[in-house]
Amino acid sequence: MARNLILTLCVGVMTLIGLQADDVLEKKVGTRIEIVRGEVVKVDPDGVHIKQGGATLKYFNKDIQKLTLDLPPSYALGLNARSKGDFNAVISQLNPLVAKYKGAIDPKISDAMISVADAYVELKDYAKAEPLYKEFEKLYPAEKGRANVGLAKLAFNKKDYQTPLKLLQDYLAESTKVASPTLAQERAFCEAHYIVGQCYDQQKNYPLALEHYLLSAVVYPGYKELSEKAQARADALRREQNPATGVPKIYVQ
């Protein structure tokens, strides 16, 4: 009996280990969802190749309801480095995952790809950031707005204050229609409003600058580091531009 119990426990542990090591794909089959477990060994623009036992099969994106990759600890380490502002660590931890999985429809990969491009911007390595944003736009056309946020940052850093306003116009309009943004969307919307605020700030259009800084700070507080910067600049603008007494020159209704 003890031997059988040990065997049962071993099988259970092996099963759990196997599940933990599996990538999971939910495939649409008519009105049903079929679960496929295995290892994603290759990513194509139109699908993924999954190894199951001794066979490798391709599944097309059009038939995939959801893909969940079982990523190594480097993914969490990269996001943690991003929150701490350690941008070299972001690149070293996430770049290998991007190189291996870019184009996969798991949102963790699109987030990792944008994070690497953003890290290059923070390190002022614009030559590496720009092609990543453009590749992201091709691989994830439904998330074009996030790529435009990155390209807007590059334009702003070149002291081009008109291009970001054009690039982000549609994305900011989209932001008003999203009642419950994902964490990735909230981060991107926050950043978009902050960039636009900076552009208006540079153009001395202080009322519009204040409006976008406050949208960045108050509506999308999930991106804590940037929303705090936006609030600080909004407060500074009020102090700089409003007289000590009387009707304020800049305000938000």
Image (spheres, grey):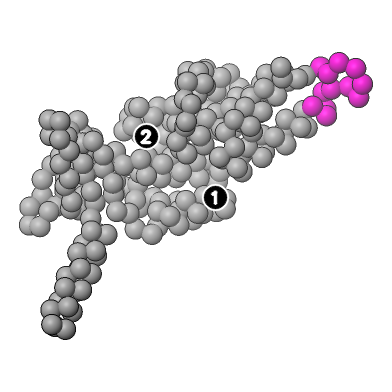
User: x, y percentage for residue 30?
Assistant: 12, 30
Q: Main secondary structure of the magenta part?
A: loop
User: x, y percentage for residue 104?
Assistant: 28, 41
Name which residue type carries label 2: Phe
Report the side of 149 relative to 43 (left or right).
right
Q: 35 or 185: nearer the eye? A: 35
Looking at the rendered structure, the secondary structure element under dot 1 is helix
Quadrant assignment for the C terminus: top right
Residue 118 vs 164, above or below: the answer is below
Residue linked to disc 1 = 83
Please report whichever mark, 1 or 2, sits nearer to the chain's N-terminal start.
1
User: x, y percentage for residue 52?
Assistant: 12, 53
Which residue is situated farthest in the bottom direction here? Answer: 2
Report the side of 99 relative to 27 (left or right).
right
For the point 16% across and 83% down, the residue is 2
Residue 159, can we see it?
A: no
Name which residue type carries label 1: Ser
Residue stretch in magenta: 238-249
Of the two numbered discs 1 and 2 in the rendering, the one whose residue sits closer to the viewer: 1
Residue linked to disc 2 = 136
Residue 22, can we see it?
A: yes
The 10 Å Cα crowd at callout 1, few under 14, some 14 to 19, many 20 or more, is: some
Residue 6 vs 137, above or below: the answer is below
